[in-house]
Amino acid sequence: MTLLDPASLATAFKLTRPIKTGKPGNRRAIAAILFTICLHLPQPGTAASIKVTWDPARVVPGGVVMMKVQAPVALMAAEAAAGADRFPLLKMVDGTYAALIGVDVRSETPTLPVEFSLFPVQGGPPYRIRADLTIRDSRQATPRVQKLSLPTGMVDLNQRRIDQVREDNQTLGEILATRTRERFWREGFMMPVQGRVTTRFGTGRVLNGKPRSSHSGVDIAGRKGTPVKGSNTGTVRLADDFYLSGKTVVVDHGWGVSTIYAHLDRIDVQEGQEIERGQVLGTVGRTGRATGPHLHFGAFIRGAKIDPLQLIEVTRDFNNRSQGS
């Protein structure tokens, strides 16, 4: 195994973004790209021509990053592993292989190790590369906080409601634990409804004066009955009525990506149904624990709770970059 020190990274890996090592801030930037080339490099000089980049360059808990790998030889396939999840990389039109990775909003680790396995067309042992992505501290001196007043029974739950919420959460957790390797979507993700974003991802919440967990998606204001569209192509995994989130739909888009649509007034799809990007799933409502009609829109990447607006941004021109395989 060969470990390269930060000062030699820019030369050895031909990084697409020049990095100077003089300032402490730049040294931290280089430390964010701790590459280790290990096991079975078939020919001399191979390490110097492997490139790993990501977009955006900086990520915080709840963020989304597109990591790309460029190998010196033609590849038959490529895959990556982050934590317990292993997933295929997608070949892009520029010849690189990409992985969409989410950093869970609850993450407290300073780095996210990602291991890549690249399988050459000519056969033989694979290239194995590790990239440690640095996660920036997103804590704010004055974090956003939303204070809401709700009926007491919606905040201070009795035992029957507590049991119901636990059952709902277990059902949702089992759905989101499903990992579909195949990618169903070809274009970038879209907003499911047009409207003003009233609550941002990660906003702290205080209900009837009592602190609660931070917001796990975005709330989009809308009139009751406004059509809600699927953010991308996929399969409906959940179409149910929960106590807190009301009428809820979860769509599995494959490649480990899922989206959730909550507080719907009406559900127009069924579990197991395949839907297209932009297809109507239901309508805006105020079912469950809600103060008014709106859509709660959330997203997950291999179980990591992420900002759905970042998912839209990172995949915006995806159809122009992928080969559609």
Image (cartoon, rainbow, N blue to C red):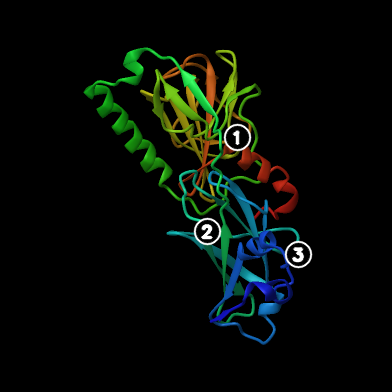
Q: Which residue is mark 2?
A: 111
Label 1: how many residues lie within 10 Å, few (<14), some (14-19) or many (20+)? many
**Would residue 257 appear left or right of 12 to someone viewing this image?**
left
**Left or right: where 21 falls relative to 154:** right
- Report the amino acid beneath label 1: Ser
Q: Residues within 10 Å of mark 2 (few under 14, many from 20)?
A: some
Question: Residue 17, image x and y in percent?
Answer: 76, 62
Q: Residue furthest left?
A: 159
Q: Amino acid at mark 3?
A: Thr
Find disc 1 in the rendering and name its residue: 231
Amino acid on which disc 2 is placed: Thr
For the residue pair 147 and 313, the one nearer the viewer reads as: 147
Q: Nearer the viewer, residue 127 or 74?
A: 127
In the rendered image, is residue 187 in sight?
no
Residue 16 disc label: 3
Contact check, label 1 and label 3, Cβ < 8 Å: no
- What residue do we see at 70% from left, 58% from top? 92
First-in-chain label (2 vs 3)? 3
Sooner in the amino-acid sequence: mark 2 or mark 1: 2
